[in-house]
Image (cartoon, rainbow, N blue to C red):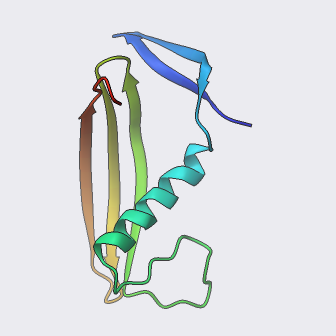
Amino acid sequence: MAAVRPVRAGPNRVVALEQERWAEPLHEAIPRVIREDVSNQLPSVTVLLDGEAADAKPDVIIDLEIVRFELLPGESVVIETRGWVRCRAGSARLIHSVARAAITDGQ
């Protein structure tokens, strides 16, 4: 079942667009897209999602939290993430990212 798409309709109002639904659940789509993007940018790296290889000993672990994923109809899409990059050596670094893409007629 596709998820209803909530969008911001004003500073303090969100509405559900019943006729516009995501093709797949975001909790599946976002990790898949991130994996594809990292794999395309770093073709010599093996990218595993959580739970795929319990016996794997990765050199780097990235934990991401989606803080905000928002569509402003006719304007833009905003995604804000916070995450932690941990190396096998044990060091960790906090990362924070906000991406905004304008919606064009071609979308």
Residue at position x 43%, y 83% from top?
A: 46
Above or below, comparing residue 83 to residue 18 in the picture? below
Which quadrant: the N terminus?
A: top right
* In front of the other: 43 or 7: 43
Q: Position of residue 55 (x, y in %)?
A: 60, 91
Q: Position of residue 106 (x, y in %)?
A: 33, 29
Residue at position x 62%, y 44% from top?
A: 24
Above or below, comparing residue 96 to residue 41 in the picture? above
Task: Tell me if 100 is positioned left or right of 35 in this view.
Answer: left
Above or below, comparing residue 71 to residue 44 in the picture? above
Answer with the quarter of the image where residue 59 lies.
Answer: bottom left
Above or below, comparing residue 23 to residue 49 in the picture? above
Looking at this view, name the residue that lies furthest to the right.
1
Q: Position of residue 16 (x, y in %)?
A: 57, 16
Residue at position x 34%, y 76% from top?
A: 86
Answer with the quarter of the image where residue 61 lies.
Answer: bottom left
